[in-house]
Image (cartoon, rainbow, N blue to C red):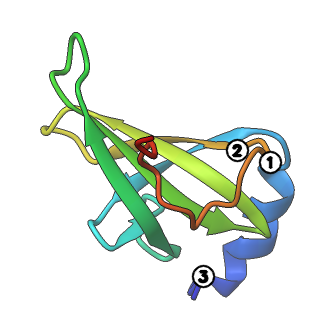
């Protein structure tokens, strides 16, 4: 459901093995002009020692699984990187109790 056809190819080529900055819009991650809309697959909230909260945002872009991190409640900037293939992205993200 990526809606930006003009910059999708440029972004998918320029982000191979790299990082990128996106902006959090709750259900979607967008670029600065808002022309690129990437749906969020799952989201977790945890603690951070300086910003008090940290948001982990999981999404799929250009055929790869990505993790985005947003620090604090007063920003929409999401720092994104490609995930390593350790486990499927759509499994529950909590630990299983024995």
The reply to whether residue 33 is visible in this rendering is: no
- Residue at the image position 85 percent from the left and 49 percent from the top: 16
Dot 3, crowdedness within 10 Å: few (<14), some or many (≥20)? some
C-alpha separation, residue under disc 1 versus residue under disc 3: 27 Å
Where residue 70 appears, as percent x and y from the top left, is 34, 39
Name the foreground residue: 63 vs 23: 63
Image disc number at residue 16: none
Q: Quadrant of residue 52?
A: top left
Q: Earlier in the sequence, mark 2 or mark 3?
A: 3
Q: Quadrant of residue 34?
A: bottom left
- Residue at the image position 44 percent from the left and 42 percent from the top: 95
Q: Earlier in the sequence, mark 1 or mark 3?
A: 3
Q: Position of 27 compared to 98: left or right?
A: left
Front: mark 2 or 3: 2
Residue corresponding to mark 2: 83
Name the foreground residue: 41 vs 92: 92
Callout 1 touching callout 2 (CB < 8 Å): yes
Give the secondary structure at mark 2: loop
- Residue at the image position 51 percent from the left and 56 percent from the top: 58
Residue corresponding to mark 1: 85
Residue corresponding to mark 3: 4
Q: Quadrant of the N terminus?
A: bottom right
Q: Quadrant of the C terminus?
A: top left
């Amino acid at each position: 459901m990526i809606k930006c056809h003009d910059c999708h190819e440029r972004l998918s080529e320029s982000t191979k093995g790299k990082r990128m900055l996106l902006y959090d819009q709750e259900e979607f991650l967008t670029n600065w002009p808002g022309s690129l809309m990437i749906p969020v697959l799952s989201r977790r909230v945890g603690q951070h020692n300086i910003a008090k909260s940290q948001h982990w945002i999981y999404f799929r872009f250009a055929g790869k699984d990505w993790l985005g991190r947003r620090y604090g409640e007063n920003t929409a900037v999401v720092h994104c990187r490609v995930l390593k293939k350790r486990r499927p992205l759509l499994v529950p993200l909590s630990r299983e109790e024995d």
